[in-house]
Amino acid sequence: MNLTLQVNGQEHGVDAEPLTPLARVLREQLGLRGTKIGCGNGECGACTVWLDGQAVCSCLYPVYRAADGSITTIEGLADAGRLNAVQKAFIDHGATQCGFCTSGMIMAACALLAQNPHPTEADIVHGLTGNICRCTGYRQIIQAVLSVAQQGNA
Ligand code: FES
Ligand code: FES
């Protein structure tokens, strides 16, 4: 099935079975490999992208349903090569180790901050419960997101 996807502000023609997970199409057809596939069943958050500004698990999202919306991946966050505030904060706080969770974690954190620009630490912990990190112990991740919330420049 031929579909047109709007990804990071650009139109892309793809050819995929309608129920193919969006994450696979992003990675395999568009080469956007920043979106990871970990569990493949909605439990780890590594595949988090935005659809019309909402964080979704792209490992579960059928590509045909995404064709109606505007998709943003981690590759679309930086503005003309300048990292956004959350990306910078992850670096500054050492919030990434192996990096496998990082794209999804940042996409989820940015979506959280868009909905609630001044979350408490508890709000951040709650907001990121769908994103699993095996390496960092979460402390640096939460501190990074909190620092952006406190600067108010997400
Ligand atoms: S890969 Fe999608 S939630 Fe784990
Ligand atoms: S940095 Fe390795 S899983 Fe999070």
Image: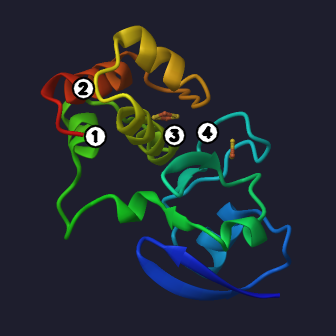
Kind of residue sitting beneath label 4:
Gly
Question: In the rendered structure, which disc, 1 or 2, sits on the residue that comes first in sequence?
Answer: 1
Kind of residue sitting beneath label 2:
Ala
Question: In the rendered structure, which disc, 2 or 3, sits on the residue that comes first in sequence?
Answer: 3
> Disc 2 designates what residue?
149
Checking the image for residue 86, the label placed there is 1
Q: Find out whether the residues at labels 4 and 1 contact each other: C-beta distance under 8 Å.
A: no
- As measured in the structure, the alpha-carbon distance from the residue carrying label 2 to the one carrying label 3 is 21 Å
Q: Mark 4, residues whose alpha carbon is within 10 Å: few (<14), some, or many (≥20)?
A: many
Q: Is mark 3 within 8 Å of ligand 2?
A: yes
Foreground: disc 3 or disc 4: 4
Q: Position of residue 68 (x, y in %)?
A: 65, 71
Q: Secondary structure at mark 2?
A: helix
Foreground: disc 2 or disc 4: 2
**Quadrant of the rendering where the N terminus is positioned:** bottom right
- For image coordinates 28% across by 40% down, the residue present is 86
